[in-house]
Image (cartoon, rainbow, N blue to C red):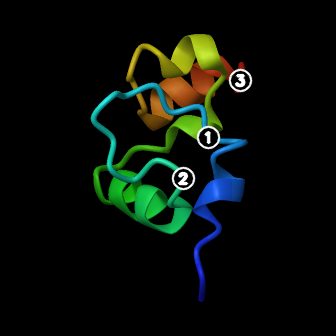
Amino acid sequence: MECNQGKNMTNCNCSYPGCSRRGICCECLSYHLSSQQLPACCFPDAVERTYDRSFKAFAKAWNL
């Protein structure tokens, strides 16, 4: 499978400056799930910038 990193960047709201997985969704998702987190694209921009990628933060952000 070929990565569409360029296309993925249009939807990637990751604000972490040192992120090596930006736009590489399969690597990003795998990385965050292994840490019991969700990737930036699951959060509104204001919440994403807090770098709290926990499931609890996700539920709070979306009023679940």
Q: With 52 as the anchor, is 7 left or right in this view?
A: right
Label 3 Cα crowd, 10 Å radius (few <14 / some 14-19 / many 20+): few
x, y percent for residue 53: 43, 32
> Which image quarter: residue 12?
top right
Farthest-out residue, bottom = 1
x, y percent for residue 25: 54, 60
How far apart marks 2 and 3 lie (CA) works out to 23 Å
How far apart marks 3 and 1 lie (CA) works out to 18 Å
Residue for point 41% across, 33% down? 54
Residue for point 66% across, 22% down? 44
Q: With 15 as the anchor, is 36 left or right in this view?
A: left
Circle nearer the N terminus (2, 1)? 1
Q: Quadrant of the C terminus?
A: top right
Which of the two residues, 44 or 58, is positioned nearer the viewer here? 44
Q: Quadrant of the N terminus?
A: bottom right
x, y percent for residue 38: 48, 44
Relative to 64, residue 5 above or below: below
Of helix, strand and loop, which one carries label 2?
A: loop
Of helix, strand and loop, which one carries label 3?
A: loop
Q: Can you tell which of label 2 and label 3 is closer to the viewer?
A: 2
Which of the two residues, 18 or 51, is positioned nearer the viewer here? 18
Label 2 Cα crowd, 10 Å radius (few <14 / some 14-19 / many 20+): many
Amino acid marked by disc 3 = Trp
Relative to 45, residue 10 above or below: below
Number of on-image labels:
3
* Residue indicated by mark 3: 62
Q: Which mark is residue 12?
A: 1
Amino acid marked by disc 1 = Cys
Q: Are marks 2 and 1 in contact (CB under 8 Å)?
A: yes
* Residue indicated by mark 2: 23
